[in-house]
Image: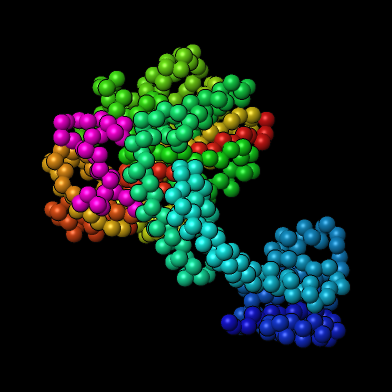
Amino acid sequence: MALAKVMWVDDEIEILEAHKRFLEMKGYALVTFTNGFDAVAYLSVHDIDLMLIDESMPGMSGLETVSRVKKIHPHLPIVLVTKNETESLMDEAIGSQISDYLIKPVNPNQVLLALKKLLDNKRLVAEKTTASYQMQFRTMLDSLEGDPDYKEWIELYRQLIYWELEMEKSESPEMKEIHLAQKKEANHAFFKFISRNYSSWIKINDENVPLLSNKLFKKKVLPYLNDTNPVVWLVLDNLRFDQWKVIEPLLNESFKLVEEDCFYSILPTATHYCRNALFAGELPVALEKKFPQQWVKDDEEEGKNNHEEFFFIQQLKQLNLCDLDFSYTKILSHEDAVAFAENAYSLLNHKLSIVVYNFVDMMSHARNELDVLKELASDEVAYRSLTKSWFAHSPLLTALKTIAERKCTVIICTDHGSIQVKNPIKITGDKHTTNNLRYKTGRNLDFNARAVHAYRDPALAGLPKYTVNSSFVFAGGQDFLCYPNNYNHFVNLYKNTFQHGGISMEEMIVPVVRLESKQG
């Protein structure tokens, strides 16, 4: 590893010779100057990694030198060394973009610590992260081999996401590969877990099954409608748990996180199934029977999420809450979002305000067609980064900050997540078979039964049976379903895109969080 090059500027540099030798013994290369003029001249033709500079020097002060240096090297870390502890100096120093300061007299260990913090912090954090993950790796493998239940799967997934986010700080490609392999193995085991247990969850109506989409309002929203605070229920579509974790810090200034939990999205993990179940409090098989006019089949052209408010009113009737004061807002475009942000205070005029925000879904689907977005979201890290960047500059964040100025409760959830698909699987069906890449429903489907999870009787999965011979087929892991016709074209088109509808931790184990405003 190359030596870090450090410049030290002090008009009494000769009395710091012992400090200089100490730092050189620790592996740093030092160049010294007694005045700011010579330091600036040197930096006009040379690069360094960090500067230590005395604040009080004749001719040109430390802060004046810093100002000139920043014009040459705007991102150079600078440590100010000073006898002056006044608040005004510290304010001026911070305004001059110094990275740290030390109060004289300084000892060599203080200087060493400052250098490590600024120059070696990334490496040290990466080494510690790698070592910690290695310790946890065996524990997580043991969890997979121990046949986890649905609660343990949530915790295992949360741990995998925690380490995935930590691994972004690591410079060890080997450890990242190990983590990716472990997540792949976990998804393989999760696919088997869902295949074995999902039908029983649909049949059993008690506390021994996970919280599914159709029970979310009753369990996670309804209990807080008795409080004095207005409740905003934000359904941010297609939001994975890892995406929630990267936008969470942007809300910390305005909100207090009261509860962070996960629930299981129903199958298929597609918007019109999951979100209609979310608002109706019913599984799709019941919705299709009770409301045939409002339930739209997969192969029909009509919009399949046009009746969410209607379905929610039906759930309120079942719960004897017909008099509940609520509003329903759906954001489908940037223009909608801007208008929504401008009128955010109106959300607090109702006991419950439902907001369905579609941008994340539009972003991920648009990625399939737009080359620019393919570049911006080429992998999981980039997809999270794109989500965070969007949220940081979105009208949605503006609206949330606005309502946080008053007392309110905000409950954020999603309908399903998504996964980056990599492995094509061939499937055939008639012209009425659906186009979704992660699941298919139709008549006379032909597929490799070992590669997918299928329901010949859709009612076992709480799903409608549209014709006598219709069935549902779900892809797992990072697989996606392609027809033999134009097979290579569609494989090249959709490989490495983010899709939903199938069985994976990313699609099914999704966040629901409760926030309370800090102001008001």
Numbered-mark total: 0
Q: Quadrant of the C terminus?
A: top right
User: Residue 67: horizontal and vertical position, in percent?
Assistant: 70, 68
User: Residue 498: horizontal and vertical position, in percent?
Assistant: 35, 51
In magenta, the rendered stretch is: 448-477
Which residue is depicted at the point 38% across and 46% down? Answer: 193
Which residue is depicted at the point 53% across and 40% down? Answer: 261
Question: Residue 44 lies in what quarter of the image?
Answer: bottom right
* Of the pair 255 and 431, the residue shown nearer to us: 431
Q: Is residue 22 above or below residue 262?
A: below
Which residue is depicted at the point 26% across and 49% down? Answer: 452
Q: Is residue 406 above or below residue 132?
A: above
Q: Is residue 332 visible?
A: no
User: Residue 59: horizontal and vertical position, in percent?
Assistant: 81, 77
For the stretch drawn in magenta, what is the main secondary structure? Answer: loop
Scheme by which the image is coloured: rainbow
Direction from residue 257 to residue 270 in the image, left or right: left
Q: Quadrant of the N terminus?
A: bottom right
- Magenta includes 460? yes
Which residue is depicted at the point 42% across and 55% down? Answer: 186
Q: Is residue 351 above or below residue 398?
A: above
Q: Is residue 485 visible?
A: yes
- Magenta includes 173? no
* Of the pair 287 and 453, the residue shown nearer to us: 453
